[in-house]
Amino acid sequence: MKKIWLPLIFSLFIISLSVEGYAQVRLKILSYNVLNYPNPDYNDQRADTLKKIIDFYIPDLFLMQELKSEAGLQELLDVAFNHSGAQFAAGEWVSQVSNPGSSWPLQQNVIYNTEILVLLSEYYLLTAHRDINIYRFLVKDENLDSHQDSTIFYAVNWHLKSSQGAANALQRALMAEVLVDHFEDLDPDASIFVAGDYNVYNSNESAYTQLLNTTNAITLQDPLDAGGNWHDNASFSYLHTQSTRTTQINMDGASGGMDDRFDIILVSENMLHPQHNFQYVDQSYEAFGNPGGNCLNQRLIDCTNNDMPANIVYALYQMSDHLPVKMEIDVTLPAALGLANPTELFQMTGGNLVRDELTVQFPANVVDRSFSYEVLDMFGRPVLRGQLTGSALRIYTGNLPAGMYFLRVDALNLAPFRFVVISN
């Protein structure tokens, strides 16, 4: 059976629809290798430099790689984000646990908008090289209980082994294997994205291909669908993220100009499904600050046709040898459909997963009454209507696209039942 990735469908929620409309929250995500922050050899106040970038884009979720200390994380939170209030918070600081003998330990962490997101839990996976950090977030909806799992997603933040060569590629592959194995422990319909510094040079590397393998418990996809040999290739210069420099600054970072796609965000397949409540916003993914294909092997500040303000381009050049990657996700809030109290007045035979036929058994006190019914998609739009009389309702669903739907029966004054059509 073909797997259809839908938001945690094995938990049945009783939801009352409002067909007049629906609410969405747009999440702005930015993933950034902040280059050994804070490297004590720097004297240029890079937190102020990052503030310019953050004030320009204002992400709701900021994922960082190459943090060196809790003090550095706190400085970025205070200076770049909370300089005029306390709207943002950071994850818990845990020094690198994997590879304890490393002479240059680095860590990942997140800063997030507390007005939109709740950090429910955070943990890390051990690898031979560096930790893989995983954050479980809730998208707030004031009209719902704070733990409705249809508004929960996972953010994976990692930094794979750097440099070319078979030995380094193998270490990247082994780290990817740890994450793929962990997917077995998650709900197969979980909403998840994997962001960070992949350090891969082409889409044939094992670390990358493992993640996109369709036999995984959770399949990831590249929103750009941009497979190929990315390294030093003008055809892919629009997605290059390193290096912003041709020579080092303060004796740190990579040189050589823009020629690699190291920084990537992959999303779970369900985020590309048109009826998923976490929906990738088309064309929102980009190497932030890349002028769009004319910067191969150049310094970022020398590239032309960059539509960003010059001070932001210069800030990106100074802040790191990497460019951040941005992506946006629209989240459909269940509260937009209204919330009703659960009812046990009728039941779905066989649960809420259906292929060709939905069967609903009615209680004795409504037998032999005549009803009209509607099947609505997740946005409250009717897709099927009909009449029924008797103790059970059978609806043919074989012509409906795979996705989440709601059954509403008139005259019963009941909350609609959520069900999911899966393909054969």
Image (tube, helix red, strand yellow):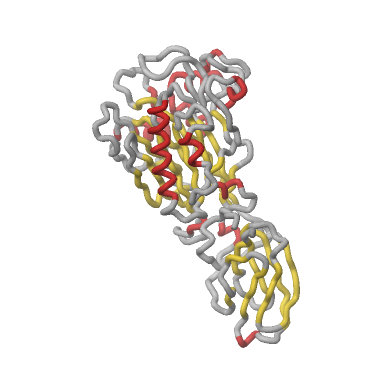
**Image quadrant containing the N terminus:** bottom right
Most extreme residue toward the right is 386
Task: Name the residue rendered at 57%, 31% in the picture.
Answer: 286
Q: From the top left corner, tell me how far across and down residue 324 is, in percent.
A: 49, 29
Task: Name the residue rendered at 62%, 81% in the picture.
Answer: 362
240 to 251, vertically: above or below: below
283 to 8, vertically: above or below: above
127 to 161, vertically: above or below: below
Task: Name the residue rendered at 35%, 47% in the picture.
Answer: 123
Q: From the top left corner, tell me how far across and down residue 73 is, in percent.
A: 34, 34
306 to 282, vertically: above or below: above
Task: Name the residue rendered at 53%, 66% in the picture.
Answer: 12
Is residue 274 visible in the rendered image? The answer is yes
Looking at the rendered structure, the number of numbered marks drawn on it comes to 0
Most extreme residue toward the front is 166
Left or right: residue 365 versus residue 78 is right
Left or right: residue 162 versus residue 405 is left
Q: From the top left corner, tell me how far across and down residue 159 is, in percent.
A: 40, 33
The residue closer to the viewer here, 118 or 204, is: 204
The residue closer to the viewer here, 309 or 370, is: 370
The residue closer to the viewer here, 7 or 336, is: 7
**Image quadrant containing the C terminus:** bottom right
Residue 236, quarter of picture: top right
Q: From the top left corner, tell me how far across and down residue 124 is, in percent.
A: 35, 44
Is residue 74 visible in the rendered image? The answer is no
